[in-house]
Image: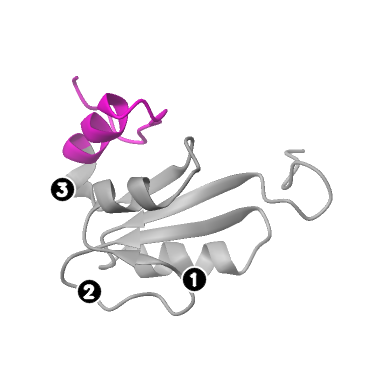
Amino acid sequence: MIEATRSGSEPAGDLIIVSLGQQGRPHARASSATDAFRVIGSADPHAAPIPGTPHHKSLNCVLRATSERSPLATVEASLHLDATAFLLEAGVPAPASKPIGL
């Protein structure tokens, strides 16, 4: 069994939602329904913010606004390569759920 939280009510991980389209908003809803992850920000230059979550125009802005250095990011499929490369160049661990060649 995977432990959902690090200790007590502290979340196991921080989550950045990149692109609030077809997948981003459902990821945000699912994450807010559990204590396992904390949504620390969203990035989308064209979408309305998620209520109660810091919203930014770009992934770079989210990273500059947070002190968390190891967030997970949910990213629209067409942005996987660019977002993963950006996170790696910024020194942020970036597990990718899709095979990409970097």
Secondary structure category for the residue under label 1? helix
Residue furthest to the right: 8
> Does label 3 or label 1 sit earlier along the sequence?
1
> Does label 1 or label 2 sit earlier along the sequence?
1
Q: Residue at label 3?
A: 78
Disc ID at residue 94: none
Q: Residue at label 1?
A: 29
Q: Residue at label 2?
A: 47
CA–CA distance between discs 3 and 1? 21 Å
Magenta residues span 81-102
In this rendering, the label closer to the viewer, 3 or 2: 2
Mark 2, other Cα within 10 Å: few <14 / some 14–19 / many ≥20? some
CA–CA distance between discs 3 and 2? 16 Å
Residue 18, picture quadrant: bottom left
Mark 1, other Cα within 10 Å: few <14 / some 14–19 / many ≥20? few
Secondary structure category for the residue under label 2? loop
Question: Can residue 91 be found in the magenta stretch?
Answer: yes
Counting from the top left corner in percent of width and height, residue 36 is at: 66, 53
